Amino acid sequence: MLPTLEAAELPADAIEVARIADAWGIKGWFKVLPHSARPEALFSSKRWFLQPPGSKTTGAFRLAIREAKEHSDCIVASSEDVPDRSAAEALRGARVFVPRSSFPTAADDEYYWVDLIGLPVVNREGVALGAVRELLATGPQTTLVLDALEAGKPVERMIPFVSVFVDKVDLPGRLITVDWQPEY
């Protein structure tokens, strides 16, 4: 990492949202590959926290963002802490975190995937179907991927995350209710 970046601890609510791909241009801009098709969190936060690739510590470097914008199939960003191309190249591979508290407020019936990970899922009859391990963007819809145990064996379930199957997402109550049966 750059010696001029300020060392910092990751905030308790830090979420990994992207990684830095490479330098972009000669004036210190850098390419950012977001983990989401809708990278509003990158645009709304004016301070990012960077970790080198593969780092498992809570230590990070704080990066004050001057500007971030869409460009082609990626995001490009600049910072006063990154004055030239060489400094931007030194960021290559860094993981980008932002505090969850700086995410824009989701609209009604919209959810950040990170908020759904780990939530238990039950059907209308109250039968536990598993917990959300991940979400998949499958083209026309997003799919919940659940981990469950049946007869002591791990089972994976996939449920389309669409209103015809998802009755309720209760974030404060930490529960998703669906119209789905265990044998589907």
Image (cartoon, grey):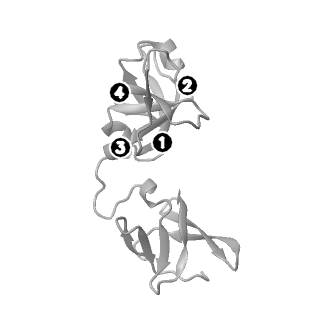
Tag 4: Cα neighbours inside 10 Å, few (<14), some, or many (≥20)? some
Q: Is 166 drawn above or below residue 25 in the view shown?
A: below
Question: Where residue 57 sits: x, y (%)?
Answer: 55, 36
Which comes sooner in the sequence, label 4 or label 2? 4
Q: Which mark is residue 40?
A: 3
Is residue 80 in view from this perspective? yes
Q: Residue at x 49, y 15 (%)?
A: 3
- Badge 3 amino acid: Glu
Do the residues bearing badges 2 and 3 touch, measured as CB atoms within 8 Å? no
* Residue that protrudes farthest toward the bottom in the picture: 125
- The residues tagged by marks 1 and 3 sit, at their Cα atoms, a distance apart of 13 Å
Q: Which type of secondary structure does the marked residue at label 2 adopt?
A: loop
Q: Residue at x 35, y 27 (%)?
A: 65
Q: Is 43 drawn above or below residue 23 in the view shown?
A: below
According to the picture, the residue beneath numbered tag 4 turns out to be 65
Which comes sooner in the sequence, label 1 or label 2? 1
Is residue 138 in view from this perspective? no
Which comes sooner in the sequence, label 2 or label 3? 3
Q: Nearer the viewer, mark 4 or mark 3?
A: 4
Which comes sooner in the sequence, label 4 or label 3? 3
Q: Which type of secondary structure does the marked residue at label 4 adopt?
A: strand
Q: Which mark is residue 92?
A: 2
Task: Tell which of 147 and 166 is nearer to you.
Answer: 147
Question: Where residue 19 sits: x, y (%)?
Answer: 51, 35
Q: Nearer the viewer, mark 1 or mark 2?
A: 1
- Badge 1 amino acid: Glu
Q: Nearer the viewer, mark 1 or mark 3?
A: 1
Q: Residue at x 37, y 46 (%)?
A: 100
Q: Is 177 drawn above or below residue 55 in the view shown?
A: below
- Badge 4 amino acid: Ile
Tag 2: Cα neighbours inside 10 Å, few (<14), some, or many (≥20)? some
- The residues tagged by marks 4 and 3 sit, at their Cα atoms, a distance apart of 14 Å
